[in-house]
Amino acid sequence: MGAAMRRIHMGNALGAFGLGFTVPFLYVYVAQVRGLGSMTAGMVLAVFAVAALVVLPFAGRAIVRRGPLPVLLAALVTAAIGALSLGLANSATTVLLSAAALGAGQAVMQPALATMIVDCSTAETRSRAFAMQFFLQNLGLGVGGLIGGHIVDTTRAGSFTLLFSIEAAMFLLLAVIMSTVRMPRAPKVEGVPQARGGSWKQLLGNRAMVQLSVLGFVLFFACYGQFESGLSAYGVEAAGISTSALGTAMAANTAMIVVAQFAVLKFVERRKRSRVIAAVGLIWAVAWLAAGYAGLGHGSQTMATAAFVSTYALFGLGEAMLSPTVAPLVADLAPSGMAGQYNSAFALVKQLALAVGPAVGGPMGASLHGPYVVTFLLFSLGITFLAVRLGRHLTPLQNQPSPARSRVVAQGGTPAEPVRASA
């Protein structure tokens, strides 16, 4: 890794660490500590999603026109103001406005950082760069949540103010680190058309990108959108899972990602991306079968708990396989100069799925146990189908940019000599 990429990865870890400090405790803070009730707390969580959906369509164009670094710095300052204000807010209005600023800043960080990774990597190194990003994000979230849990005290509002102040400080520290990054000129890939204006119309005309966006929606809807809503409700109501076992299941998910991320990387790099995503669909189908056994198998409570924990672990394995696959594919589908637009569009799809997923899965998981498992089992098989279909619209180099089949990449617009596989 070069100096720029090291700073970017450090920034990813710091940002995730700051988020981990507050995200698990946001509902308790608003509803109980500030005494604003569950309705306001629910609205705060909704505001996060709405703010992201509002700003992301504009973030892509800003990244294309201004570059990812200035957009990232603006997002970090906005998020820091939102976090600090949230820690000091004591009315519903100020809480909602602060949450909007924090949510908007967080949403824009994702495509800006992803575009910086694209600009500082090549087709051959991109998968490892995004795998490292995902690894550090999960590590930062886990460590932040662990430390934050030992700081907060629901009887003292000041402990939460300290928590949000630390989060704001992390964002500002990240802004200082990112301001020292010297970005290279975006890599130019032979055979890819130049962007003209960065319009959404051009993006929607890219059939492969549209299919990947549909696939991405299903991925996030059927997995990430169920973690803290439908699947947890299903585990408690259908399988009788205790809160401690639910925490163990979440820990198993994170542990699987941390342990498996680099173990599966070499395997993933040697396979076609569409086949890797198709395999993830099958793995998640097995995960839903395990969830079905936990809640509907009428076995012992120990077996039900083991099956439920296995569900989260299998989801983590799939996530580890996706991190070096999907984000680099988004970048490789983007015409030269359009990576920011494509990253923002995919982040928008992700936010839509994360907003719809809990709304659909939550009530089903709590009351319609059998239909819930069958529905998301079918969605997982749908991932496999959509991935195979997507593979037909990818070029060989988009589907498998391995060192032996590398693209011709030039820095600063000067064509490089083709990379030849060694005999």
Image: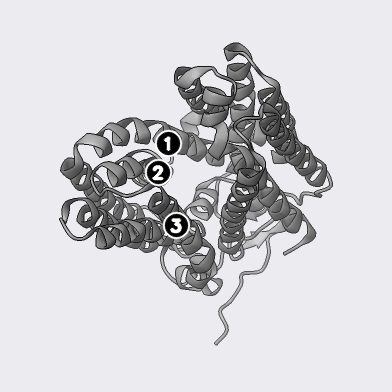
Figure quadrant of the N terminus: bottom right
* Disc 1 residue crowd, few under 14, some 14–19, many 20+, Cα 10 Å: many
As drawn, is 199 to the left or to the right of 387?
right
State which quadrant residue 190 falls in. Answer: bottom right
N-term mark: 2 or 3 = 2
Closest to the camera, between mark 1 and mark 3, is 3
Q: Is residue 216 left or right of residue 186?
A: left
Kindly identify the amino acid type of the residue bearing the numbered disc 3: Asn
Out of 291 and 131, give the one closest to the viewer.
291
99 or 222: nearer the eye?
Answer: 99
> Can residue 175 be seen at all in this image of the molecule?
yes
Please, what secondary structure does the residue beneath circle 3 have? helix
Residue at x-position 67% and y-position 51%? 13
Circle 3 sits on which residue?
Answer: 253
Q: Which mark is residue 220?
A: 2
Residue position for label 1: 354
Q: Position of residue 150 (x, y in %)?
A: 64, 46
Q: CA distance from mark 1 to mark 2?
A: 6 Å
Image location (x, y in percent) of residue 206: 43, 41
Tell me the quadrant of the picture where the C terminus can be found.
bottom right
Q: Residue at x 26, y 36 (%)?
A: 366
